Image (cartoon, rainbow, N blue to C red):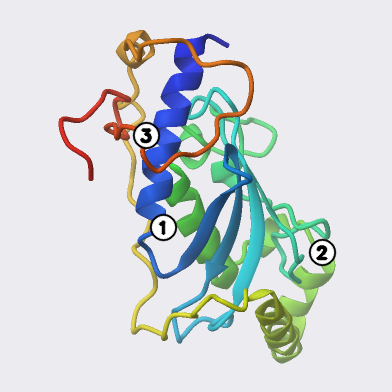
Amino acid sequence: MSSDERKIAERMLMNELKELQKENWVDVDPRDGNLFIWDVALIVVNPTSLYSGAYLKAELKIPKNYPMSPPEFRFTRPLFHPNIYKDGKLCISILHAPGEDETSGELASERWSPAQRIFTVLISILSLLDDAEVSSAANVDAGVMLRKDPEGYKKVVRENVEASRRDIPEDFVMPLNVESAPPEKEEVDDDFWCESEMESDFGEDSSDAEMMFDDDDEESDPETGEDEDKAN
């Protein structure tokens, strides 16, 4: 991996992080200032969701060559859900490596592409919670219960929601429920990414050590990695 690739990833992630921190449906911070590992909590503010009121803690690991490769997402308090493994990892197409997969039948348009962003991933995960794909269950027991005993499944979900609320930090104020869910996932253009981004000049090379997050860092355009004329 070239130093330019890492710089692109760092600058894109810094901008994405700042935008996500403005949202009321997610609580996110880089772990110990490391831009490539985020502590995340998805906050379900949609009152019609089975998970309404939940504070779902997770960790997000982002590759150094982001956005060429997808991040890894894992709930740290596992949920009883057809598409969530018992270790908290997800079975969701958007986190799968780019390209078509003949074995699973997934199309390239359903999987990760360099045009995707962390925002898109988190929105997709929120959507998956209430729209489970039981045909490709990661947790067979949850899939069977959802089909055969939906009321029993709802009871377990409510228990999961109550358990998740124990993870709310003491100094964190949960947002009030809103009438609609977070914005829906937007369609992305796979031709968006171009090699010219890789050739952008960002000055001195960064070291191999983890970059520490600094609010005073220069802002950049999240799509091109080039410095903007003024801060957000």
Q: Residue at x 56, y 35 (%)?
A: 70
Give residue 131's quadrant in the image.
bottom right
Q: Which of the two discs, 2 and 1, sits closer to the camera?
A: 1
Quadrant that contains the N terminus: top right
The CA distance from mark 3 to mark 1 is 16 Å
Give residue 86's quadrant in the image.
bottom right
Percent x, y for residue 203? 36, 11
Q: Which mark is residue 183?
A: none
Local crowd size for mark 1, using a 10 Å CA cut-off: few (<14), some (14–19), many (≥20): few
Q: Amino acid at mark 3?
A: Asp
Work out whether mark 2 precedes mark 1 in sequence or the reverse, and give the earlier one: 1
Percent x, y for residue 21? 41, 57
What secondary structure is marked by label 3? loop
What secondary structure is marked by label 1? loop
Give residue 208's quadrant in the image.
top right
Q: Which is nearer the eye, 20 or 137? A: 20
**To which residue does mark 3 refer?**
217
Q: Residue at x 70, y 33 (%)?
A: 103
**To which residue does mark 1 refer?**
21
**To which residue does mark 2 refer?**
140
Q: Amino acid at mark 2?
A: Val
